Amino acid sequence: MKIDTKRNGTEFTVLPDGEVNAVTAKELDEVIVKELPGTKLLILDFEKCDYLSSAGLRVLLAAYKELKKSGGRMLLRNLGEYITEALEATGLDGVFDIQ
């Protein structure tokens, strides 16, 4: 998996390319955790990602909780069918802001 990132002030965008699975979720977590301080809006753009495992869902939930503590928010964009179904099956579609 490749991860592109963009920062614009307090806005940080993460663009995973490939699968977020049990192996690659750690890499995604490291990228997000490193940039959370000072981030008020975390955008995860899944345009080039077609798979998100339960390990990936845990990364998203952990980031969401940290942002919420500091008054920030998280936005998920360009979700494919599989990722949408995973969020719906876990009830996280009602937790995350999805665009």
Image (spheres, grey):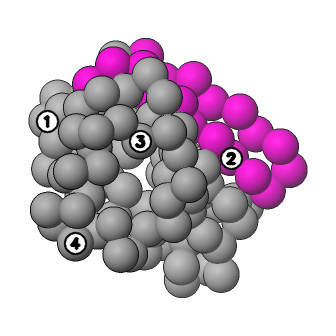
Give the foreground label among 1 and 4. 4
> In the figure, is residue 21 to the left or right of 77?
left
Label 1 crowding class (10 Å Cα cut-off): few <14, some 14-19, many 20+? few
Mark 3, residue position:
79
* Residue contact between numbered discs 1 and 4, judged by CB atoms under 8 Å: no
Going from N to C along the chain, the mark reached first, 1 or 2, is: 2
Going from N to C along the chain, the mark reached first, 1 or 4, is: 1
User: Quadrant of the rendered structure where residue 10 is?
Assistant: bottom right
Question: What's the residue type where badge 3 is placed?
Answer: Leu
Going from N to C along the chain, the mark reached first, 2 or 4, is: 2
> What label sits on residue 91 in the rendered view?
4
SS type, badge 1: loop
Task: State the CA–CA distance, disc 2 to disc 3.
Answer: 18 Å
Mark 2, residue position:
12
User: Which residues make up the magenta segment?
Assistant: 2-19
SS type, badge 3: loop
Could one spot residue 25 in this view of the protein?
Answer: no
Question: What's the residue type where badge 2 is placed?
Answer: Phe
On the rendered image, what quadrant is the C terminus found in? bottom right
Could one spot residue 76 in this view of the protein?
Answer: yes
Q: Which of 14 and 96 is in front in this view?
A: 96
Tell me residue 41's x, y (percent). 68, 60
Question: What's the residue type where badge 4 is placed?
Answer: Gly
Label 2 crowding class (10 Å Cα cut-off): few <14, some 14-19, many 20+? many
The secondary structure that most of the magenta stretch takes on is strand
